[in-house]
Amino acid sequence: MEAAGSLAVNNKMRGCVGGVGAGSPQQGKGREYNRNQRKDSEGCSESPDLEFVYADADKWAAELSELYSYTEGPEFQWNRKCFEDDLRLHVADKNWTELDVSQQRAHTMRLLDALEVTAREKRLKVARAILYVAQGTFGECTSELEVQTWQRHNIFLLLEAGAFNALVELLNMEVENSAACSSAVRKPAISLADSTDLRVLLNIMYLMVDTLCEEGEADSEDWKTMRQTFRAELGSPVYSHEPFAVLLFGMVTKFCSGHAPHFPMKKVLLLLWKTVLCTLGGFEDLLKMKAAKRDLLGLPPLPEDSIKVIRNMRAASPPASASDLIEQQQRRGRREHKALIKQDNLDAFNERDPYKADDSRDEEEENDEDNSLEGEPFSIEREEVMPPSITQPPAERLAFPKGLPWAPKVREKDIEIFLESSRSKFIGYTLGSDTDTVVGLPRPIHESIRTLKLHKYTSIAEVQIRLEEEFIRCPLSGGEEEVEQVPAEILYLGLLPSLPQYMIALLKILLAAAPTSKAKTDSINILADVLPEEMPTTVLQSMKLGVDVNRHKEIIVKAISAVLLLLLKHFKLNHVYQMEYMAQHLVFANCIPLILKFFNQNIMSYITAKNSISVLDYPYCVVHELPELTAESLEAGDNNRFCWRNLFSCINLLRILNKLTKWKHSRTMVSRADACGFQVCSYSKKST
């Protein structure tokens, strides 16, 4: 289980900005600590729990709406007009939903045949008509659920007709279109119109991949077979002799190199994320594959699922700001050193519940802590360690599980290190990797060794490293190494030749989309697929575009963080050295300082940001009459208490940081040095 998981993947995340840390006892007389009855009106010192469910993706409507920018709103009706004009030429006086399946299949084949025309304008109209079909023919629907039903039906028709293969060929042609690339490079300002063809193709492909990624409850056996075949082909080198994800990675690097600045990068990254998720699998699939691999290697089953365990843990507040932390350290330095504590008090503290609050403090110390240590992240880091008060009624205490919420894991190396230090201390010699001989060691050491071995855990990575070392030591006697061609292995082989460039490109875009980044002249332009041809002329249009731009950046951060995390986890399961190679290039590209820079902001403000206009989200905007937008409604935003994608991105980045620094002391020290640098810079700016 990941070490940072206890803070990262929590079903309920409580926030606190400049106030009492979540889960810590509230100080002062006459105040009660109640997790379920806290009010926002009491100030920033108290923030309610956020009912957040960490999963592979958000709900269907939310994921679908993020594909389109608000600037693309008028194109929904353009797609509809292109389809209806074409349908009237071949089927008189009938809507799409009134046709039987054979007629729908015949018209779908007719549309795909029309994609092969050489005239760009005609091809674009046909592509828009196909996009309208993939969008669920919303003009004939009256609800979002009906749009979803028809969208799934139509996408299976497109898949059966071979639409995805045709779209990949067209996408390859657009990517290699040197005339469009050179024209975009010469333009001083790139807008939405420069990527029209690419956006239409990417929209259709995203809708197909996203819909076919999950199995529907009402899917027939034919649909299930088609879906499994599609997932297998998507992860195989059948498209231009490489997996489809490699083509998308190539688009990312071409965009970052400046040779194709008109590429709609948000759509490319979203399609890349869904492709990786569809071919490799999500977190639940990963857990199943991990259990199967442990069984294949003869290892005991997993003790638990870390994500499920953390969902039942107490919420944790984000850390205080840099200036507050420095002020706390200065105040602590001026205090008296803590006095020696008797052994019986230490025993009482060790036996206490580590998750229960410690309210037995002197009145003077309570007032001091209440005024000077507000926002302290963890109440366990107090200067005094006192046993819990026996006079406090047990009903006022929170009932959290005693001890660690997850099963401890001890490596073989941990046991060897402990035995080596114990033998050096008590006997004066060591026995190397021998973990069985305990002659001459005191009885408490025997008990400690027995406890460590009781929780011994052998990971898949340890077995893979041991097998690799044996193969290198005896390459001839070991025979030829057999490598199973699973989707992760196929994808890694496709990415391997240019893996450093892919990682650098992703981090470049992440840096440009980070909210803490400042605009620079040499930075890449990631707003090419959100800026309109004509800039806004009214205050309302400017506000709408500002919301759209911020939303655009948040979606890019979400897609990149999800792609990196999925690749790290799947490569580690396939072979730990693959993950280490990818992590090494992420570290070389300054991924650790970038993530720390991302978190050098007010996280609660980022999580609760309201950069969305719910009435303009697809599919709501095409099945309901839109109200008149005002500046007040744009400022108010939606009614959600937090932004799912932003919280999802923060958790993913924390887990990536954990992957990069776990068991890597040098990387951990670099992270601490960078974090201290950010704190000092923030504090100095605030002081000046």
Image (cartoon, rainbow, N blue to C red):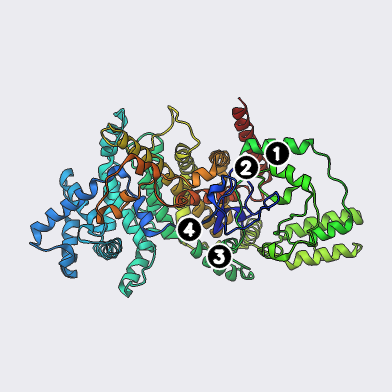
Per the image, the residue denoted by label 4 is: 488
Q: CA distance from mark 3 to mark 2?
A: 37 Å
Per the image, the residue denoted by label 1 is: 328
Q: Residue at x 29, y 46 (%)?
A: 199
Q: Of callouts 4 and 2, which one flags the residue occurring earlier in the amino acid sequence?
A: 2
Per the image, the residue denoted by label 2 is: 320
Q: Quadrant of the N terminus?
A: bottom right
Q: Is residue 54 visible?
A: yes
Q: Of callouts 3 and 2, which one flags the residue occurring earlier in the amino acid sequence?
A: 3
Q: Quadrant of the C terminus?
A: top right
Q: Of callouts 2 and 1, which one flags the residue occurring earlier in the amino acid sequence?
A: 2
In the depicted structure, whether residue 121 falls above or below residue 459? above
Q: Are marks 2 and 1 in contact (CB under 8 Å)?
A: yes
Q: What amino acid does circle 3 point to?
A: Lys
Rate crowding at label 4 as few (under 14), some (14 to 19) or many (20 or more) other CA atoms within 10 Å: many
Residue 451 falls in which quadrant of the image? bottom right
